[in-house]
Image (cartoon, rainbow, N blue to C red):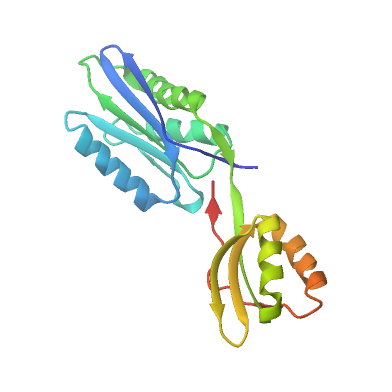
Amino acid sequence: MPLTLAAPVHSELIIKKSRFIGCVQPMSDRARAQKVVAELWAQHPGARHVCWALLAGGQSAAVDDGEPSGTAGRPMLDVLRHQDLEGVLATVVRYFGGVKLGAGGLVRAYTDAVAQALLQAEKVPIVRLATLRCAVPYALEGLLRRELEVAGASLLQVTHGQEVVLDFSLAEDAGVALQARLAEVGQGRIVWLAPAENGGLTG
């Protein structure tokens, strides 16, 4: 099962007078990752490089930001991949200390900055959510609400019209069991509708 991180974690290394400030954090897409990188530049105007790697399905990226090609972003991404992570951004801010590290030294420095942060990070399973919608007679609303609570579903919206329409989300693997349970307790009076939104991911 793929894992993501519960919260951002930082690390700091000094290698031959260069300072490497690493961070790993949960991140769902490239647009948000680029915003974080822009914020790091604002916080560290004296830095020489802000290199980053994002592991997020089709939006993954590896950016060397002026370091020799393949010495920063790609090694950082490899560290994330080896830990079976998904939806994670790794950033490393480098202050140049005047001593060149060479390609091998750079790869080790960027790899270590990410790996050290990950050692302290809390990893959590990624839960895929399904969004479901159903209509029930008013007489069954209380029963349905109780069943959703027991199943650990999150109620998103309730609309009262001719019937009660409920939108809710829960873990994908629990959805089928819940539908079978509701078919039994609702005695065929629960009507399933197309959900208003698609399911998403949460950590």
Across and down, in percent, residue 125 comes to: 60, 42
Across and down, in percent, residue 198 comes to: 55, 66
Q: Quadrant of residue 113?
A: top left
Which residue corresponds to the image point at 30% horizontal and 47% vertical from the top-left? 35
User: Foreground: 166 or 96?
Assistant: 166
Q: Is residue 183 above or below residue 90?
A: below
- Numbered-mark total: 0
Q: Is residue 124 above or below residue 111?
A: below
Across and down, in percent, residue 99 comes to: 24, 14
- Can the viewer see residue 123? yes
Q: Is residue 59 above or below residue 103?
A: below
Which residue corresponds to the image point at 35% horizontal and 20% vertical from the top-left? 12
Across and down, in percent, residue 73 comes to: 39, 35
Direction from residue 120 to residue 103 in the image, left or right: left
Direction from residue 114 to residue 169 in the image, left or right: right
User: Foreground: 116 or 6?
Assistant: 6
User: Foreground: 8 or 91?
Assistant: 8
